[in-house]
Image: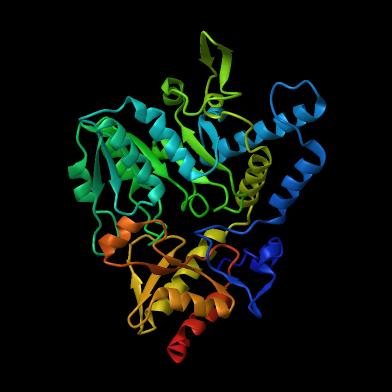
Amino acid sequence: MSAHFDVPALRAQFPALHQSVNGRPLIYLDNAATSHKPLAVLTAMDAFYRRDNANVHRAAHTLSARATEAFEAARGTVARFVNAARPEEIIWTRGTTEAINLVANSWGASLGPGDEILLSTLEHHANIVPWQLLAQRQGVQIKVIPLTTTGELDLAAALALLSPRTRLLAVSQVSNVLGTVTPLARLIAAAKSEGALTLVDGAQAAGHLPVDVQALGCDFYAFSGHKLYGPTGIGVLYGRHDLLEQMPPWQGGGEMIRKVSFAGTRFNAPPFRFEAGTPPIAEAIGLAAALDFLTNLPDGWRQHEADLLAQLCDGLDALPFVRRIGRPSEQVGVVSVTFDDWHPQDAGELLDQMGIACRVGHHCAMPLMEALGLDGTLRFAPALYNTREEIAATLAALARLPEFF
């Protein structure tokens, strides 16, 4: 851990961490599902509702002007966080899932028989099902990049699957089950060489890795607020502005129009074309506060996270009854395990009785589980506010599991 990264001081900013669960101090290792929120986020959202609560855009009164200013400033904060070329490339959504559905239903409307979409075995259901629905509607074919034995994408197979028929490569940056960091630079470059667009599911990456959409060269990038210390119900779709200008709206209503008559409707410019109805104003302000919080952290927090994950993996490997799933060369934020003699659900429930919060199940990645020959795993997902002592306590609790079985 970096000497400059003060974990106790950081933890003081997260009220939810300071509680007992089942009579034990909480050890929260379910951060891949959702992370806790710092005081900066809670304060920003509370201040909006207490002082500036009003709907955004168009109104003539002062509260609406203040709300609009804060709301659009939040869009600018996100644009800087992902290094978008302009704020208009940032679309507010309810989360990664809605962002991907937006692309599938808007940009995807141009696809038809003979067109192909390339996914990977690592994908969350949110980056599978929208494309399956599109394929059913429009005759698009889906192809899937397989895995290697270490839980990484088979790059040679991916390159072989790309062809002039590939219209979109849609892959996660980090697996929510194995923590695998995918070789995006190689994949995006290869997709571009075939004329395909690229969409990156950054839900598991944006809270751990630097995000630079211009350096990546991706056409779309999606992430959720609640996995990087922001509120629930808010997410982001980055899209290249020239693409967004060509895409039809997905949902109709207020804000996304220029003029409505019964003879026809003219639509607004991006991003507003894709933001029908009252947007998540307080949530956008809260997300901006979370991104400012993350951006302004002292140096060393990413190394601290890497050290925690290494400590956890080493400790898991030392337990003879634990089987760690996947051993990717680059891993972030997540490690999954199974057990030789009992079900992960039983282990998860026992850990909960010891105050340790982790996740059990297929993690909305059933095709990955099928490829691995599993029906589920026990998943640990440490984050920047976890401590080496918490990891040690978790490993000690796991070591005791044979006593209960």
Determine the residue positioned at 76% across, 27% down: 65
Determine the residue positioned at 34% across, 69% down: 325
Res. 163 in view: yes
Task: Locate residue 16: give its quadrant.
Answer: bottom right
Farthest residue, direction left: 160
Task: Locate residue 323: give its quadrant.
Answer: bottom left
Q: Quadrant of the N terminus?
A: bottom right
Is residue 157 rendered to the left or right of residue 399?
left
Q: Quadrant of the C terminus?
A: bottom left
Determine the residue positioned at 62% across, 34% down: 279
Q: Position of residue 142 (x, y in %)?
A: 25, 41
Task: Locate residue 76: give its quadrant.
Answer: top right
Q: Position of residue 269 (x, y in %)?
A: 53, 20
Res. 219 in view: no
Q: Position of residue 250 (x, y in %)?
A: 47, 28
Determine the residue positioned at 25% across, 49% down: 145
Q: Position of residue 174 (x, y in %)?
A: 40, 53
